[in-house]
Image: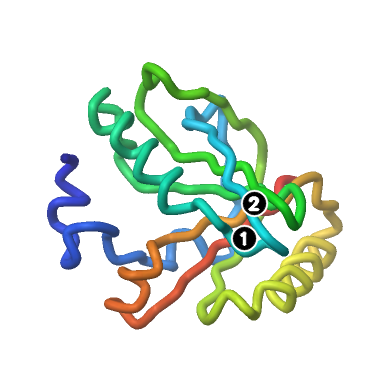
Amino acid sequence: MDKLYEQAETGCCPRFDPGPWDRKEVTFQDKLFVKDHVRSFLHIPLNFGKVMVRNMERIQAAGALAPEPLLLSDEKSPWGADVYIAVSRDVPGAEMARVSGTFLTRVFEGPYQNIRQWVEEMKAHVAAQQKKIEKLYFFYTTCPKCAKYYDKNYIVLLAKV
């Protein structure tokens, strides 16, 4: 397993530092991800854990952990989301995707129930910079167990502009 994960206090998700992500402009050029789909009911994931375990096993077996964890979710509908797990190389047996573009970011902290408010704040943030959102991704920085341990539930919104 990668040193960053091994050094995490939880043995799972590393502690998240919001500084490098809050109110930044980030550019990805063909950033490589494993792509999968999570079934949801009104945006509440139903099989997220199973999807993550399956993909993390493949990623670890391929020695493809990204140097820094990045999990993006594209909430396509109330019934499902595409998830993108950053990797360092192609992963056999997984669907691969590349993401490019310029993104404005904001970090939010709190319970997931605040997501609608955060989306509105993100829209205002982008509009204040005279830009339009092409696509919105959610970066869940830790799993629920680690968020509880760290007593922080950070979510980064990335608006492709």
Quarter assignment of residue 121: bottom right
> What is the image's colouring?
rainbow
Q: As drawn, is 158 to the left or to the right of 63? A: right
Does dot 1 land on a helix, a strand or a loop? strand
Neighbor class of circle 1 (other Cα within 10 Å; few <14, some 14-19, many 20+) is many
Residues marked 1 and 2 touching at CB (< 8 Å): yes
Q: As drawn, is 55 to the left or to the right of 108? A: left
Query: Which is nearer the N-term, disc 1 or disc 2?
Result: 2
Image quadrant holding the N terminus, namely top left
Q: Amino acid at mark 2?
A: Tyr
**Depth order, front residue of 39/9:** 39
- Can you say whether 55 is above or below 125 in the image? above
x, y (%) of residue 54? 37, 38
Q: Amino acid at mark 1?
A: Leu
Does dot 2 land on a helix, a strand or a loop? strand
Neighbor class of circle 2 (other Cα within 10 Å; few <14, some 14-19, many 20+) is many
x, y (%) of residue 29? 56, 28
**Residue that label 2 marks:** 137
x, y (%) of residue 147? 37, 73
**Depth order, front residue of 37/99:** 37
x, y (%) of residue 130? 86, 58
- Looking at the image, which residue is at 45% across and 43% down? 51
Q: As drawn, is 61 to the left or to the right of 76? A: left
**Residue that label 1 marks:** 157
* Mark 1 and mark 2: Cα distance apart in space: 6 Å
Report how many numbered discs are placed on residues in the image. Answer: 2
Residue 94, which numbered label?
none
- Looking at the image, which residue is at 42% across and 47% down? 50
- Looking at the image, which residue is at 35% across and 65% down? 16
- Looking at the image, which residue is at 66% across and 36% down? 101
